[in-house]
Image (cartoon, rainbow, N blue to C red):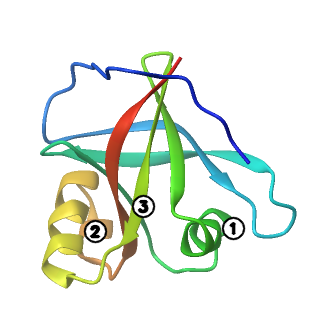
């Protein structure tokens, strides 16, 4: 179980934008918090994680437990992940994330509702 200390969240980031950051999920194998660096998209107050398939451990972790954390400007934020099923939304996020041919490849992903900052 993860315990949080909450405070009002504040960060200044351009929308839309993309950046590489640490993402924390809960492992399906041992229940421990795991981290990985991902290229993520920020758009209209939400964070998006996308991938070309569902085989990665972080993707499987989020399918099993929707609680997620990510780092931005040295601060850790938390939220809830919801798997995206809207192909138009996924395509839009890929157009933001990539400038090369990857932007047209089929993707899977999660929309993260940002809920606060961990202090």
- Residue contact at pointers 1 and 2, CB within 8 angstroms: no
How far separated are the C-alphas under marks 1 and 3? 15 Å
Q: Residue at x 27, y 60 (%)?
A: 100
Residue 72's image quarter? top left
Name the residue that disc number 1 marks. Answer: 57
Instruction: Identify the mark at residue 2; answer none if there is no mark.
Output: none
Element under label 1?
helix
Q: Could you tell me residue 53's position as x and y percent?
A: 51, 80
Q: Foreground mark, 1 or 2?
A: 1
Q: Could you tell me residue 86's position as x and y percent?
A: 20, 82
Q: Earlier in the sequence, mark 1 or mark 2?
A: 1
Label 2 environment density (alpha carbons within 10 Å; few <14, some 14–19, many ≥20): few
72 on left or right of 47: right
Q: Nearer the viewer, residue 85 or 64?
A: 64
Q: Nearer the viewer, residue 91 or 60?
A: 60
Residue 85's image quarter? bottom left
Name the residue that disc number 3 marks. Answer: 81
Element under label 2?
helix
Q: Is 13 rendered above or below residue 44?
A: above
Q: Could you tell me residue 47's position as x and y percent?
A: 31, 48
Q: Is 56 rendered above or below residue 87?
A: above
Q: Foreground mark, 3 or 2?
A: 3
Q: Residue at x 36, y 77 (%)?
A: 107
How far separated are the C-alphas under marks 3 and 2? 27 Å
Name the residue that disc number 2 marks. Answer: 101
Q: Earlier in the sequence, mark 1 or mark 3?
A: 1
Label 3 environment density (alpha carbons within 10 Å; few <14, some 14–19, many ≥20): many
- Residue contact at pointers 1 and 3, CB within 8 angstroms: no
Residue 35's image quarter? top right
Q: Foreground mark, 1 or 3?
A: 3
Q: Could you tell me residue 22's position as x and y percent?
A: 56, 37
């Amino acid at each position: 179980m993860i315990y949080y200390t909450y405070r009002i969240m504040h960060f200044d980031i351009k929308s839309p934008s993309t950046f590489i950051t640490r993402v924390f999920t809960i492992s399906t194998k041992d229940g421990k918090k795991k981290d990985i660096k991902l290229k993520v998209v920020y758009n209209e107050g939400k964070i998006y994680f996308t991938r070309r398939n569902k085989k990665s451990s972080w993707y499987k972790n989020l399918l099993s437990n929707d609680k997620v954390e990510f780092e931005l400007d040295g601060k850790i934020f938390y939220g809830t992940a919801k798997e995206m099923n809207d192909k138009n939304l996924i395509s839009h996020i890929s157009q933001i994330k990539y400038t090369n041919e990857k932007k047209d490849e089929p993707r899977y992903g999660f929309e993260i509702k940002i809920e606060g900052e961990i202090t």
